[in-house]
Amino acid sequence: QVQLVESGGRLVQAGGSLRLSCAASGGTFSAYVMGWFRQTSGKDFEFVAAINPSGGATSYADSVKGRFTISRDNRESTLYLRMNMLRPEDTATYYCARTAVNNWSRPLHSWGQGTQVTVSS
């Protein structure tokens, strides 16, 4: 079972940038499809982005396409999410997860502690 720890969230002004990190331990990180999800207060989890094991293929929610970039470093067992042109509606707690090979938007385990991103207008 992989353990994941998210970090990098903070308060940022609209139009700004952030890079989130997700450090993995246990399991075989380099073999997993990995994804980022977010949850705003009182709402369901929303798929944000996912990446295949090699890092050669990615998928994004329409709401973040062109602004966010998912990447990974398999040597460091770390997943990243670069977020540019942030908007107040991007405010949420962000989580990383291993996702299903046949459905990249389906997480395979329970959520970690997440990292809070707050975008001020």
Image (cartoon, rainbow, N blue to C red):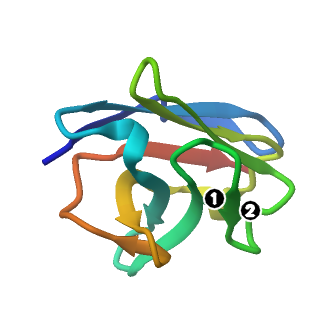
Can you tell which of label 2 and label 1 is closer to the viewer?
A: 2
SS state under label 2: loop
Residue sitting at the far left: 1
Q: Residue at x 20, y 43 (%)?
A: 2
- How far apart marks 2 and 1 lie (CA) works out to 9 Å
Residue 31 image position (x, y, % from top left): 39, 46
Q: Quadrant of residue 100?
A: bottom left
The amino acid type of the residue labelled 1 equals Asp
Foreground: 76 or 4?
76
Judge whether 63 appears above or below 14 on screen. below
The x, y position of residue 94, in whole percent, is 44, 52
| Marking on residue 64 | 2
Q: How far across and how far down the image is residue 59, in percent?
A: 68, 64
Q: Could you tell me residue 32's position as x and y percent?
A: 39, 51
Label 1 belongs to which residue? 90
- Residues marked 2 and 1 touching at CB (< 8 Å): yes
Residue for point 34% across, 78% down: 42
- Residue at 77% in and 45% down: 14
Give whichever of discs 2 and 1 has the lower sequence position: 2
